[in-house]
Each structure stands twice: as C-alpha cells, then as structure tokens.
Amino acid sequence: MSTAIASKPSFSFGQLHTGFKKLPDSVQNFSNAVWGMGILLLLWWIGGILIQSNPDTEAFAGFAPGPAFTALAYLIETGSIWETIYSSLYRIIIGLFWGIVIGVPVGVLVGYFVSVRQVANMPFQFLRMISPLAWMPIAVLAFETWDNAIIFLLIMATVWPIVFGTAHGVQRIDPNWFSVAKNLGADGFQMLRRVIMPAIAQDVFAGIRLAIGVAWVVLVPAEYLGVTSGLGYAINDARDTLDYDSLAAIVVVIGVIGYMLDAIAVMLIKRYSWRVE
C-alpha cells in the first residue's frame, strides 16, 4: 500500500506556475495588459470614491470612471468628439511631418560628418534643452494664424529626438559597409539610399516614437492658445464650464490616441529592426 501511495503523481504550485509560463507570448502579453489596465481602473475607481466622499472635493466627482465613461459614450454618440480629434491629429501629423523632413537630413549630416557633429553638438544640445512651450511668445508673433503657431511648437518638440536618433543610427553603421559600397562604385546618392537609410531605419523610427510622445504632451497646453478646436481646447473649455465628467472623458481619449500612435511607432521599429544571427 505504501508503494502505491509513493507512486501516485504529485502536483505543486510550482508546476502550475511553470504551466502558465508555457502560454503563447501573445496570450501572456494580452493577460498582462488586462491585469495592468484592471489595476489602473481599480485605482481610478478608488480615487473617485475618495473624491466623492470628501466634502471639500465632492464637486469634482465627475472625474470618477462612471461619469467619465458615460460622458465619453455621449460624446461618441453625438459625434462631437470626432472634429476635436481630427483637429489635434491634423496638427500632430503636420508638425511630425516637418520634424521628420528637417530632422532626418540634419541627423544624417551630423552623424556622417565628424566636423559637422563637432560644430553642431553644443548649439543643438542647447536648443534641445529649451522647452517647446518656451517658444510660444515667438510663435505667436511670427505666425499669422494660431494653427501655424501650434504646428511650429510641435516641430520644435519633434525635431530634436529625430535629429539625435538619426545621428546615433548613422554613427552605429559599420565603416566596412561604406568601404564595400565605394568599391562597388556607389555614388553619394546610392550610398544614402542603399546603405545609410536601410541601416538607420530602426533608429529613425525610435526617434519618431520619442518625438510623438513629446509632441502629444506639448499639444494640449499648446492648444490653450487662441484656437477653438482640438483636444487641448476641449479640456480648457470643460474646465471653464465645470464639466468635469467631459474633461475626464477627453483625458481618456488623449490617452487612447497617444497609445495608438506609440503602438504604430513600435510596429515600425520592429518591422525595420536588424537581427544578427
């Protein structure tokens, strides 16, 4: 009888943990995301209860998840949120476009030519450390429309991560690649198209990812300027009218769109990543 008992298969929590480890990566990632968002919503819900139960802050009870999601459903149902999103995305896309157009060529020059890098390093580092919002008075004076002023601020927010990301990518290129290309008769344009751009694609998109994050943060206070559209304007308007549930709903929209933009950048980085066996 003792032999039968000894041969009985045993089960432990360690084996259960090992079993969970064998889940497919996609399932595990989804599970982790659900757990993370669940914890965030729980903290938000607890914060809403604390705000509502405090007589000094009960006027801000609209920040709780219930009122916020109710307001969000109303904004989507009425369609009023779509024009707001479109205005902000238009400014972000235009600002990011010009940030790429300026930042990538400048980054290639800085990364490829040592003399350019030595001359540009100090002024570029100096300009990079200036907050994009610090350019607001100059933007208002220099541009005729509020839209162009905001786009200028977004360019100042996006150009530096792209410049430095691109320059870092160029500096990481194996010099032997240039030697091989020259031996095969590549001219300057072919060197750029066949060697440099494919090699730095991952670094460029990493810089763009950082640029999107900075620009999305700068956008909301930038839209406090004289515009009458956009997510920043909607937040400012909700604050002035004490419409706190709509304000919280717009904050949720900002987070969702920002996450989607970042996810697109991550997808591009993975698409152009180099894997050395």
Image: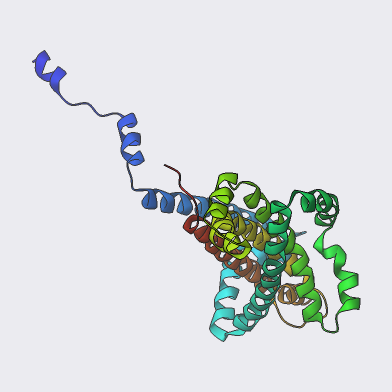
In the rendered image, residue 206, in percent from the top left (x then y), is placed at 60, 55
Quadrant location of residue 158? bottom right
Of all residues, the one furthest to the top in this rendering is 2
Q: Is residue 106 left or right of residue 4?
A: right
Q: Quadrant of the C terminus?
A: top left
* x 53%, y 57%: residue: 269
Rendered view: 260 above or below 49? below
* x 67%, y 67%: residue: 100
Rendered view: 256 above or below 17? below
In the rendered image, residue 8, in percent from the top left (x then y), is placed at 15, 24
Most foreground residue, 104 or 84: 104
Quadrant location of residue 224? bottom right
Quadrant location of residue 160? bottom right
* x 68%, y 61%: residue: 211
* x 65%, y 67%: residue: 251
Most foreground residue, 189 or 263: 189
Most foreground residue, 89 or 105: 105
Most foreground residue, 201 or 140: 201
Q: How many marks?
A: 0
Q: Is residue 38 left or right of residue 20?
A: right
Q: Is residue 175 left or right of residue 21?
A: right
Rendered view: 89 above or below 158? below
Rendered view: 104 above or below 32? below
Q: Quadrant of the N terminus?
A: top left
